[in-house]
Image: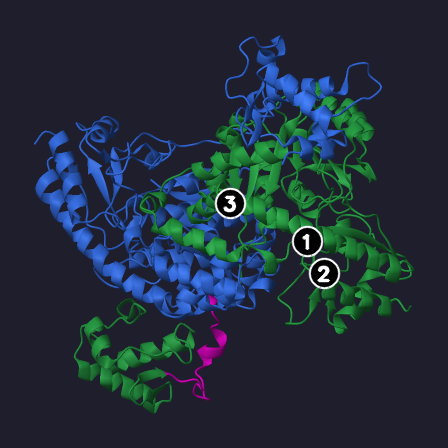
Chain colours: A green, B blue
Amino acid sequence: MLPYETLIQIDKTLRLPVYQQIANRFVALIQEGILKPGLVLPGSRVLAEQLQLHRRTVVAAYEELISQDWIVSMPRKGVMVATNLPVIRPRSFQAQASPYQQGPGFSFAAVPSLPMYPGPEPKAGTIIVNDGFPDVREAPLEAWIKECRSVVQSPRYGRMLTHGGPEGSLTLRSEMVKYLGGTRGLSISTGNVMITRGAQMAIYLAAAMLIKKGDYVIVGKPDYFFADMCFEQLGARLLHVPVDQDGIDIDAVETLCRTRKIRMLYVISHHHHPTTVTLSAERRMKLLKIIRQYRLAVIEDDYDYDFHYNSSPIVPLASADHGGNVIYIGSFTKSLGLSVRIGFMVAPPAFIHGAGALRRLMDLRGDNLTEEALARLLADGTIERHLKKSNKLYHERRDLLSDLLTTELSHAASFAVPSGGMAIWLKFAKKYPLPALSEKAARLGLRITSGEQYAYGSKPLNALRFGFASLNKKELTQAVAILKQLTGK
Amino acid sequence: MLPYETLIQIDKTLRLPVYQQIANRFVALIQEGILKPGLVLPGSRVLAEQLQLHRRTVVAAYEELISQDWIVSMPRKGVMVATNLPVIRPRSFQAQASPYQQGPGFSFAAVPSLPMYPGPEPKAGTIIVNDGFPDVREAPLEAWIKECRSVVQSPRYGRMLTHGGPEGSLTLRSEMVKYLGGTRGLSISTGNVMITRGAQMAIYLAAAMLIKKGDYVIVGKPDYFFADMCFEQLGARLLHVPVDQDGIDIDAVETLCRTRKIRMLYVISHHHHPTTVTLSAERRMKLLKIIRQYRLAVIEDDYDYDFHYNSSPIVPLASADHGGNVIYIGSFTKSLGLSVRIGFMVAPPAFIHGAGALRRLMDLRGDNLTEEALARLLADGTIERHLKKSNKLYHERRDLLSDLLTTELSHAASFAVPSGGMAIWLKFAKKYPLPALSEKAARLGLRITSGEQYAYGSKPLNALRFGFASLNKKELTQAVAILKQLTGK
């Protein structure tokens, strides 16, 4: 209930009767929009007690308001603010808007923003080609809820609320050490791991620890757009190196390191975003040498290591000899297909400690409940089983989409089959501009992106990431059929 | 499973037999710590397939490794890396540490960090006096889990994973509009609301939208330490104004506004942190005038509006006439007592939009599951009922603690009864320095803070926030008894 005794102040020294003062104050509160049409007001007995007045005074005020049509009486339910307010409104009604319809009167930062994709929640039945997300229909939802229940029922839960640092649950960090060792050959201990809200927070934190205004940061071109935007927001000047079928051009990286003071390199070695290419073994060896020689700070974003079909994945740079200069980042959000965001950062303990202090200022700590539940799913093998199953399913879907694109759409778009991940990088011929194509597709119940975000800061590439993991056979077939129809063949 | 085919490369042109090459590579991987003691290795058939070799070659390699004691054979379970590695280790074993035991070789930002409080998870049975947190034992845990289950089972859940912007779930924002209108008289719409990870993220985002290096920011003295640290981290120069029993000194604020370009004011009008005082009505009126006159950007942190005992709360500055210049911040983490962190920010739509773009770079979006579950608890009245019940319980606990402190501890500490919230600001006499007292208390099973964080950036105040909400009668009585014993009376 609203604090009516502070909203309604009575001055008994005034000549205006108290009931009238109350009524006037109610009118003002309604006019100011503080009491909204349809709001149920407290009963006269309750309000009288709150205002420390006789009940009859409140009844009189309510009657006055009813007679003026500001409030209406509802049988057995008391009174509420009229949904049709009096037509002849006092002048101040139009003049005084809610303070939040105005202003602000002060200036604030301009933050660049991309057209949001995949955008607002669509109508049921729309086929959505996302950017490479898992299939929620396959996620271990019941296991997740079961573990959450078990966490809140555990005797330790009471102590979890206020404890634990910004690096995340120790239970989860211990499980991560085993998991990252077993899947990626990372040799680390809990002091090397920080749990974050998705990989994006890890990227922001690591970059904020490194970048000062004007610093040079090397990125691929094209690159993961939210990373580029994040670095620029933090004050970096971006230096772009080309990306070909073997990943980013390491010779170009070396040339830059030789000629300028480079603050940091951002690399997505396993499946580059957006183009899905893998950094070749030869370039990895060269890059590791550069990292050691120049003590180059590297953010290695390994967002979809867990998904690989042709062969086993190449272990990350982080697992090789880099002298502690690789900050390794990954995510469980994509691996699990749950709408909880959990990522991680691996780095030397001193860096993790500093990043933790910074995270505390942005977001005191993570959700213990979520972190403990994830730890249990890792410990009991649920995640390993889920990943095995998903890999098989997504492998089939990748192959199906590759076949469909080859047989049905090769007149309009080209691609290379990715060795893993959840998306195919599909380049459309110039005669099929994506902004127009996506508009037409929307009318046929297919949502695809206009692709502009992939070329953040430069000219559009007329290409998109066609996420195949979240679509079943029927949906993939239908999506390609619609694109075939729209490209007129 | 590890990607052995990338970890183990065979060169058939070498004169060294292939089984020996495999064995050597395994020794190196064990020495480098990539294969850890106790790790179960793949069966010879599986590994042979992965490496595309004859099974006998792998068996020969494993036998070589067993004979060197690097791995051990376990009946029916295959082979694993020995837990007691060979005593005579090759020289490189000691020399080559995990890369994450080294470095980093690059420099990075120094972020100030406070002694963490309440610190790591304590032994069961320890009484913990926290800073003002709710009692998890009273939280609506079952209702929470039930709603989470219901969300993941809803047909919409599949579409939630990839959708929704950085401002948070629209369902929750609609519920927030009703909730904030009904409890605080805020007249807003969904475009004014952003859901964040706890109030801390809202503070950081709002401040990051405003502060440029060198800007002046007015704060109380003492103040909420994580806010001060956050503003400084973002480059602000802090200007401190005194805080007395009526809240921050508004005349001092006006003097500063007249003489300098002020970027922002941070105010905790309902219960100042740490001292719990309420900003008086007179000062509020004055402050609102200053806000309008100077178009002063204000962050109003209202972290515990939901808890008030003596009287109804005073509506926030945000509900009054401020011309859209008050950024209003609050939290559900404290209201619910759940270990999920949800806060919110209310501001004009243009500011919310910009803060959303910034949030996207730090943390793409919130957890849909958590946000939808909270929306349901708001809609079905669970939260209102929970708050009513908690207010009654915490009121009793505040009164009990006030009585205990008066009768048992007045020789050592003084305080004013707060009108709400979850903590009493307890000032100890000089002869009882808190760092020593807290050390002694720990030995008797009572954890209290040394209080140093409350005086961030200046000299310790020898005072602490004695959180009463999370402790029952027995625990409060015992905590005060231990303090009495330690202060020698």
Closest to the observer, A468 or B186: A468
Q: Secondary structure at mark 1?
A: helix
Mark linked to residue A393: 1
Which amino acid does the dot numbered 3 rest on? Lys
Q: Are marks 3 and 1 on the same chain?
A: no
Task: Answer yes or no: is residue B404 visible.
Answer: yes
Q: Is residue B333 magenta?
A: no
Closest to the observer, A259 or A147: A147
Which amino acid does the dot numbered 2 rest on? Val
The residue singled out by tag 2 in the image is: A129
Give percent across and percent down for residue A108: 57, 51
Q: Are marks 2 and 3 on the same chain?
A: no
Residue at 28%, 48% in the rendered image? B276
Left/right placement of residue B296 relative to residue A114 reads left
In the rendered image, the quadrant that contains the C terminus of chain A is bottom right
Query: Is A92 situated above or below B40?
Result: below
Do tag 2 and tag 1 residues touch (Cβ < 8 Å)?
no
Residue at 82%, 67% in the rendered image? A481
Chain at tag 1: A
Magenta region, residue range: A81-100
Mark nearer the viewer, 3 or 1: 1
Residue at 52%, 49% in the rendered image? B205
CA separation in Å, label 2 and label 3? 50 Å
Give percent across and percent down for residue A24: 32, 80
Q: Is residue A92 magenta?
A: yes
CA separation in Å, label 3 and label 1? 60 Å
Mark linked to residue B261: 3
